[in-house]
Amino acid sequence: MKRSNVAIFVPHKGCPNQCTFCNQNEITGCTSNVTKEDVISAVETSLYSGGYSKESEIAFFGGSFTGIDPEYMEMLLQAAYQYVSQGLFKGIRISTRPDYINQEILDTLKKYGVTSIELGAQSMDDEVLKANKRGHSAQNVVEACELIKQNGFSLGLQMMTGLYKSDEKKDIYTAQQLSLLQPDTMRIYPTIVLKYTELAILCLTGKYYPQSLEEAVNLCAKLLDFFDNMNIKVIRLGLHDSPSLKKEYIAGPYHPAFRELCESKLFVDKFLNEVKNERYTSYVAEVNPSYLSKALGQKKANIECLRDSGYDVRIIQNQQIQDGKFKLTPIE
Ligand code: SF4
């Protein structure tokens, strides 16, 4: 059985902002207040079902966790910490905004066994941050990350692509700037337009055009490769599938298998890069069995795509090849 974290969503609590793209309650699919009983119930369900290990974390996601009422925050943390202090979980993970981090908050988080902090940076371009009403600057992101690392927490960062007033160049710049902050993990979310958001109005009035799925896949494949080369793990690419997301979706590059599309695109990009100075046009590509479907692409789209680029490629499995890599042999 897969051992995973216990995820508890704390929607929009205490968040005074209304970012252009955010309809937090809809994304999390949860609109009521989380109570300490909810935390206990989620953790105990996980304990009894065996769907956890001592390496799992209890994760508070979905809002600006350190921006909620301090007493309420401590109550939720306390409910989770009893399981961490018994050694049943590795620690607690929270997500929050860069401007809701200071030494006092970090001291409280430490007291309750928080080990990982994820910051929603979204962009490192101040104009984009302002246009999307984020209410913080790129410098706030830098300062919060430095403080989090100085205090010994694991650091996760989230960025969005295709935001209002952003473009591919700015998104790549954001990825470069975030990598300099040396996060342990990254999450990348292409911007999706949801109902009841300012972005929806901008979209419906022709002031904002979301990325197409193809544009988002092309860009996110590059970002995935970039972070991989920097040894930064991308733990999420694209929004989770959920009934409420489907219900509130208006436009934008949503796909339930978004990451797989990016990994497939990356295979094509890497292949073309590797053969660009070669004289051969036919190859056998050996890949690990777990990479086969990504190398082939959905409905073998990569074979078609490479054929359109002038290459005849046969993809075969080889257990000896590292997952995500491939070995090419030209066919004379
Ligand atoms: S800060 Fe986070 S929770 Fe608040 S409006 Fe923006 S995205 Fe939504």
Image (tube, rainbow, N blue to C red):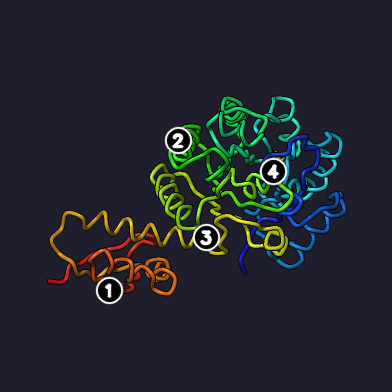
Mark closer to the chain start, 4 or 1: 4
Q: Going 50% across and 55% down the picture, which residue do you hit? A: 212
Above or below, 301 relative to 119: below
Q: Going 47% across and 39% down the picture, which residue do you hit? A: 175
* Residue 20 screen position, x and y as percent: 67, 41
Q: Which mark is residue 37?
A: none
CA distance for labels 3 and 2 = 22 Å
Mark closer to the chain start, 2 or 1: 2
Reading the image, the residue beneath label 1 is: 314
Foreground label between 3 and 1: 3
Q: Amino acid at mark 4?
A: Glu
Label 2, secondary structure: give it: helix
Reading the image, the residue beneath label 2 is: 173
Label 4, secondary structure: give it: helix
Label 3, secondary structure: give it: helix
Mark 2: give few (<14), some (14-19) or many (20+) Cα within 10 Å: some
Q: Amino acid at mark 3?
A: Phe
Mark closer to the chain start, 3 or 2: 2
Q: Which mark is residue 258?
A: 3
Q: Give 6 or 211, whichever is nearer the viewer.
A: 211
| Residue at mark 3: C-beta within 8 A of ligand 1 | no
Mark closer to the chain start, 4 or 2: 2
| Residue at mark 2: C-beta within 8 A of ligand 1 | no
Mark 4: give few (<14), some (14-19) or many (20+) Cα within 10 Å: some
Whether residues under marks 3 and 2 lie with C-beta atoms below 8 angstroms apart, the answer is no
Reading the image, the residue beneath label 4 is: 198
Q: Going 77% across and 44% down the picture, which residue do you hit? A: 12
CA distance for labels 2 and 1 = 36 Å
Above or below, 240 relative to 66: below
Q: Amino acid at mark 1?
A: Arg
Q: Going 80% across and 47% down the picture, which residue do you hit? A: 82
CA distance for labels 3 and 4 = 24 Å
